[in-house]
Image (cartoon, helix red, strand yellow):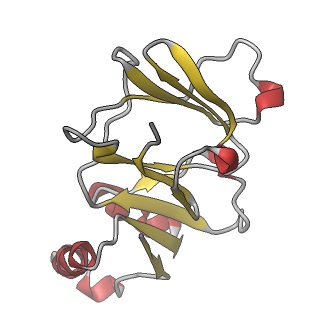
């Protein structure tokens, strides 16, 4: 579900010509055809960070417990996904960038109002979010708490690498 690009740079003589955008557009098209949802970009230099951000890449939340703190990493979600935002609706999912022992009265860092394909428990758009498996999440349906605990113990299939990817929820 994810593609990883390591050490992608443009020689200074060829910068500002749109070459990376052309290459990236072709890669994204091929990735999407292959079922890739997100690109994980590693080892970029500080000089190229602004260019990658201009191409739609984002910084990981600081609390994802990166194994390589000296490397700069960005990511880009390449499919339509459920947007974070308010939690108005019959069914919601909330995520905190911390473990359950740290929560107390903290507001969630991300929250989704869930919309399903008619007659199924498949989300209309998946949730794709950079996360750590020990972070805390809460799932409510019709005001009833269905789950609260660590991401890694969520009772639905979650693809997990550096991203929490949720496409289906149980009844």
Task: Give how far across and how far down residue 140 sits, in percent.
Answer: 51, 22
Q: Foreground residue, 125 or 121?
A: 121
Query: Residue at position x 34%, y 83% from top?
Result: 10
Query: Residue at position x 48%, y 12% from top?
Result: 143
**In the rendered view of the protein, which quadrant contains the C terminus?**
top left
**Residue 92 against residue 163 in the figure, above or below:** above
Query: Residue at position x 40%, y 24% from top?
Result: 91
Q: How many marks?
A: 0
Query: Residue at position x 27%, y 37% from top?
Result: 116
Which residue is at the far right?
101
Left or right of residue 75, residue 34 in this image: left
Q: Foreground residue, 105 or 53?
A: 105
**Residue 45 against residue 58 in the figure, above or below:** below
Task: Give how far across and how far down residue 160 sits, in percent.
Answer: 57, 60
Q: Is residue 67 visible?
A: yes
Where on the picture, by quarter, is residue 37? bottom left
Where on the picture, by quarter, is residue 123? top left
Left or right of residue 155, residue 4 in this image: left
Q: Is residue 50 visible?
A: no
Task: Give how far across and how far down residue 2 sits, in percent.
Answer: 43, 70
Where on the picture, by quarter, is residue 19? bottom left
**In the rendered view of the protein, which quadrant contains the N terminus?**
bottom left
Q: Foreground residue, 87 or 61?
A: 87
**Residue 89 against residue 146 in the figure, above or below:** above
Left or right of residue 100, residue 91 in this image: left
């Amino acid at each position: 579900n994810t593609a990883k690009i390591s050490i992608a740079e443009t020689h200074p003589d060829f910068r500002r010509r749109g070459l990376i955008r052309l290459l990236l557009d072709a890669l994204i098209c091929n990735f999407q055809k292959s079922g890739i949802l997100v690109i994980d970009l590693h080892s970029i230099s500080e000089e190229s960070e602004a260019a990658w951000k201009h191409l739609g890449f984002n910084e990981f939340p600081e609390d994802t417990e990166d194994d390589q703190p000296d490397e700069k990493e960005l990511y880009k979600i390449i499919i339509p996904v459920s947007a974070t935002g308010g939690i108005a609706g019959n069914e919601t999912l909330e995520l905190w960038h911390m473990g359950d022992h740290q929560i107390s009265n903290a507001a969630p860092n991300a929250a989704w109002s869930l919309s399903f394909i008619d007659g199924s428990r498949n989300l209309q758009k998946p949730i794709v979010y950079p996360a750590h498996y020990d972070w805390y999440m809460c799932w409510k349906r019709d005001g009833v708490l269905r789950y609260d605990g660590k991401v890694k113990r969520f009772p639905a299939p979650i693809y997990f690498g550096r991203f929490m990817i949720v496409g289906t929820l149980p009844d």
